[in-house]
Image: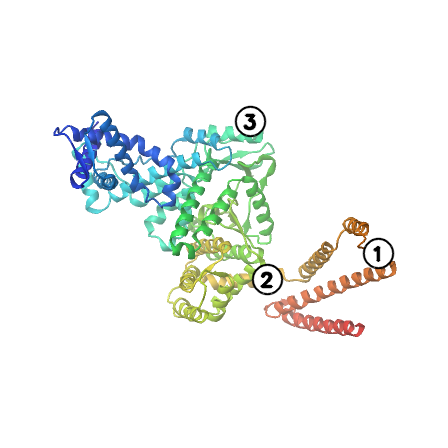
Amino acid sequence: MVNFLIQILVNTLAVSLAIWLLPGIEINSNRLLIYPLLGFGFGLLNGVIKPIIIFFTTGLVIRTLGLFMLVVNALVLILLSLISNWFLPDLLTITSWLALIFAGVLIGLIITLLDIFLGLNRPVMEEIEQNAFYWGWLQRLSSGRRNRVVENLRFQEVYDTLWRYGLQIAGSQGWLGNARAFVEQIFARYAGRVEIPSTPAQVRIMLQQLGPTYVKIGQMISSQAESLPPEWVTELSKLQSSVPPFPTTEAQALIQEDLGDSVENLFASFEERPLAAASTAQVHRAVLHSGEEVVVKVQRPNTVTKVGADLHIIQDGVAAAARRFEWARHNNIDGIVNEFAINVIRELNYDNELYNGRRLQKLMASIPSIHVPDVYGALSSSRVLTMEYVKGVKITDTLAMDRAGVDRKVLAKEFLRAMVKQLIVDGFFHSDPHPGNVLVDLETSQIVFLDMGMMGELTSAQRLDFADMLWAILEQDSYSLAQVVMRLSTRFKDEVDEASFQRAMERMVDRFLVYAEETDSLSRVITATMDAMYEHGLRFHSSLTLAIKTLAQAEEIVFALDREMSMVTVAFEAVKDLMVEQINFENIADAAKKQAVRTVKDVARQLPDLQTATMSWIEQYRQGQLEVHLNTGDLNKEVEKLNRGVEWLTIALLLGGMMGGSAIAVSIPTSIGSVPLSTVAFFTFMASILLSVVLVVRLLWRR
């Protein structure tokens, strides 16, 4: 009741000041009761009509980047004047409709300032997601397609949450926070002094209330520990595994709906208490009838609808920013957000995660220290994923590893080796390796990758350029680094001064590599490189942003395990070792064979099929436009030429592969038995050149 009366007084004060200060609006009454009535009426309309106006103008609010919200109070005030004059004719005389707009803006400003001071719209800081029933209804309404009604309702919910927390955080700082606490005690709004969480804690709770999309954003921010204060890292890191769970009964109902049988029939046992809860799902331990221990990952109810609405709203907002601000266009913000949205949507379909898990497991099989859990396709669906149960602690839990006797330096090298293989050798990488998704088995010292919903891919050219970039950084070669960066980037300015960019890269290399006092940080080097790129009209391709983010997250884990490790040096050593494993005769021959087959297929596709050619000839013959001369002898000769050509092409590709592989192997310091690999590679290289010369001479002689 006290809060209600305070709200009426605030509205009365705001309306009275606006009418007194601005010309063009007059009240034709001397009764003081009129002002509280107008304040009550404005508050009532503001609480009921304003959400309706925002619902129907959501697109306009987003396109104007929120500026239209300044007009909403004016619309409420206009409606108040119409209703007032309807009940009490000539109560308000309006000589300027423009004055109403300014009055609405002024009223909104006054109410906001008083709200900050008095704490009238304090958020309910409960670490739970709100409106489960509400979103269950919206999910049925969406029908799996983009629905503007759902998005507008979601925008209203997000706007209200951000507004409340924004006012709370603004009113909790410094002297204003002390004054606000004093006012709360005067009005006895609470029985006692309520302990207000820290600002980072409030932001974390707000992200949890906003839902999976914003929790995912918070997780990405938390991975940038080097650029965040410690208290922010501590709070946002809780988003990686400390998200409140949803009821187990809902999880079991979803499992039965998707797998077509009850939990009791599908599993020998199923633990009701969740093992862990994340932004989009929670995990339960279970045992199969065959005795194998597994975990069942179940998607949060209504997640797809909520995340889809959030992503569309964010994409529309970023697109509006890109249209209006040059910095947004130059930094390709819309491309980055679109890439993020695509990966989040893929992550919500567990069929993709099942495929990703099996593929990553095969690619990581060559590194014994890395483990990717088995997945069970028969007990999985688009919203349920059953996988092998693995034990372990977060890879950043150094205290537990030290107590268990795990060598953190070795662990850091093995983790970096795995990430380098994924990024540079395979081109298929875990794109969200935050500590909650990477565990360490304390008994075996194995590194376990979890949550393969978000993966990234790089082309072979991009992978080679990444390796080249590591080599340039290791050698402190500013010229080569500038060249590879330009190959990996796109231009957003008509003219790029390459000489100036080269000089900027020289300064960056000197500052962060040559004369750096601390252990070299790859993230710091890349950040400085991106700053230099932006100044000169360059930016990385949007497809590379995920790889760069992954590299930054990997570096945070490596430094948590071994702060003294030289990230670039160890990474490049891993590249060389992995290349030695990949470059062998079998792999080269297999690659050459595949290339030859592809070439033959491409040639075959260029030839018209017999039916099409025959019908074309018949049609031309009917029109009297075709003279047909068949000579099967010539046809046999052409077929024979094609066969010989394919044979020569296959031989040439094999020789090219041998020359390329041996040229690379010359620089690798290893041996086959007692014979250095470089010696074998040299003679192989020379033999390939000799055979190539012989083939060229024979071809020229035949011509």
Residue 23 location, x and y as percent? Answer: 18, 41
Residue 476 location, x and y as percent? Answer: 46, 69
Question: Looking at this rendering, what residue extends furthest in the top direction?
Answer: 87
Which amino acid is tagged 1? Val
Q: Residues within 10 Å of mark 3 (few under 14, many from 20)?
A: some
Q: Mark 3 vs mark 2: which is more N-terminal? A: 3
SS category of the residue bearing label 2: helix
Placement of the C terminus among the 4 image quadrants? bottom right
| Disc number placed over residue 177 in the picture, else none | none
How many marks on residues?
3
Q: Which residue is mark 3?
A: 262
- Quadrant in the rendering for residue 463: bottom right
Which is closer to the viewer, label 2 or label 1? 1
Q: Is residue 551 left or right of residue 608?
A: left
Depth check: give the residue in front, 3 or 423.
3
Depth check: give the residue in front, 38 or 196.
38
Residue 471 location, x and y as percent? Answer: 51, 66
Residue 295 visible in the current orientation: yes
Q: Which residue is mark 1?
A: 628
Residue 388 visible in the current orientation: no
Question: Looking at this rendering, what residue extends furthest in the left direction?
Answer: 30
Q: Mark 2 vs mark 1: which is more N-terminal? A: 2
Which is closer to the viewer, label 3 or label 1? 1
Q: Residues within 10 Å of mark 1 (few under 14, many from 20)?
A: few
Depth check: give the residue in front, 480 or 233.
480
SS category of the residue bearing label 1: loop
Q: Residues within 10 Å of mark 2 (few under 14, many from 20)?
A: some
Q: Is residue 176 left or right of residue 141?
A: left
SS category of the residue bearing label 3: loop
Which amino acid is tagged 3? Ser
Q: Which residue is mark 2?
A: 579
